[in-house]
């Protein structure tokens, strides 16, 4: 299995630009998670999808952030407009069903730098 | 609400020495407990987890952790470390009432020196 795939691996953009991060979960997994990792706040859950439906988006910082999962094999996290404080590593993870017995498998992350 | 505290941001240790990485948590509900490892430029990987039963859990590469409910701790130990164990280690909890959610500590960087 290829594991969770994220693209791009690195993104450098200027303040005010739109940024789209992409994730392909492991085939057969029904749950998908987006996390953000920063030095100040550590690892935070942004949003959780189950069967392509957003279940918990309480971690999404503000309206500039949006996430979609149009089908079981693809998800996007969009930031519009981007700001320097959005600079972080964004991880996507997937699991079989989201339950406590299921391991979350993390992708390699996208390192976002907003200038 | 839940929180996880990893007091040691970095732990340097010599190869073949024992190591303990500390983790304490607070929660108003019962939790499941996890340790994840992150190697440079990679995503997190599950190292071990405590769901129920025996309070001592082991991983396949020699790490173990013990759940101590009275002290609300889940410290990670290895009796003899290798250079390849150099990585960042994250303790996490998951509340039983929303078990999809992982709340992570700030991480401990284990640096194994020859």
Image (tube, coloured by chain):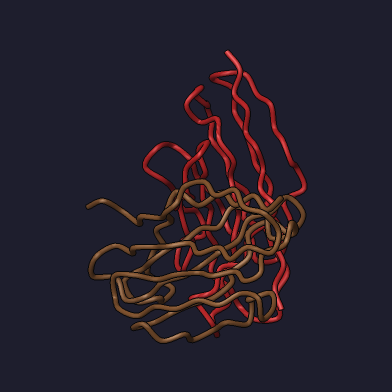
The residue at 62%/18% (across/down) is B14
The chain coloured brown is A
Is B95 above or below relative to B106? below
Residue B47 seen anywhere in this rendered image of the structure? no
Q: Nearer the viewer, residue A94 or A115?
A: A115
Q: Chain letter for red? A: B
- Residue A16: % across, % down: 69, 64
Q: Position of residue A9 (x, y in %)?
A: 47, 47
The answer to which of A37 and B90 lies nearer the viewer is A37
Indicate the position of residue A19 as horizontal and vertical percent values. Answer: 55, 63
User: Seen from this angle, which residue lies furthest top?
Assistant: B114
Q: Quadrant of residue A56?
A: bottom right
Residue found 52% across the figure and 26% down from its top: B80
Residue at 30% in and 78% down: A71
Count of marks overlaid on the render: 0
- Left or right, B26 with respect to A20, comes to right
Seen from the viewer's position, the closer of residues A11 and B47 is: A11
**Is B49 positioned to the left or the right of A71 in the image?**
right
Position of residue B60 relative to residue B74, above or below, is above
Q: Position of residue B75 (x, y in %)?
A: 63, 49
| A43 relative to A48, above or below | above
Q: Is residue A41 left or right of residue B77?
A: right
């Amino acid at each position: 299995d290829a594991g969770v795939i994220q693209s791009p691996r690195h993104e450098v953009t200027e303040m005010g630009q739109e940024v789209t991060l992409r994730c392909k979960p492991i085939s057969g997994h029904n749950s998908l998670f987006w996390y953000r990792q920063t030095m100040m706040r550590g690892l935070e859950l942004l949003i959780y999808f189950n069967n392509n439906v957003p279940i918990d988006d309480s971690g999404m910082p503000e309206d500039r952030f949006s996430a979609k999962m149009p089908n079981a094999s693809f998800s996007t996290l969009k930031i519009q407009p981007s700001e320097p404080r959005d600079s972080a590593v964004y991880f996507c993870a997937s699991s079989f069903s989201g339950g406590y017995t299921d391991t979350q498998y993390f992708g390699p992350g996208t390192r976002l730098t907003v200038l | 609400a839940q929180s996880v505290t990893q007091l040691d941001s970095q732990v340097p240790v010599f190869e073949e020495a024992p190591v303990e990485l500390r983790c304490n948590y607070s929660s108003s509900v019962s939790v499941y407990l996890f340790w994840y490892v992150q190697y440079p430029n990679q995503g997190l990987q599950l190292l071990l987890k405590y769901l129920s039963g025996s309070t001592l859990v082991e991983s396949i590469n020699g790490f173990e952790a013990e759940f101590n409910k009275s002290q609300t701790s889940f410290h990670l130990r290895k009796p003899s470390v290798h250079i390849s164990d150099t990585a960042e280690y994250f303790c996490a909890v998951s509340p039983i009432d929303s078990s999809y959610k992982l709340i992570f500590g700030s991480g401990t960087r284990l640096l194994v020196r020859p």
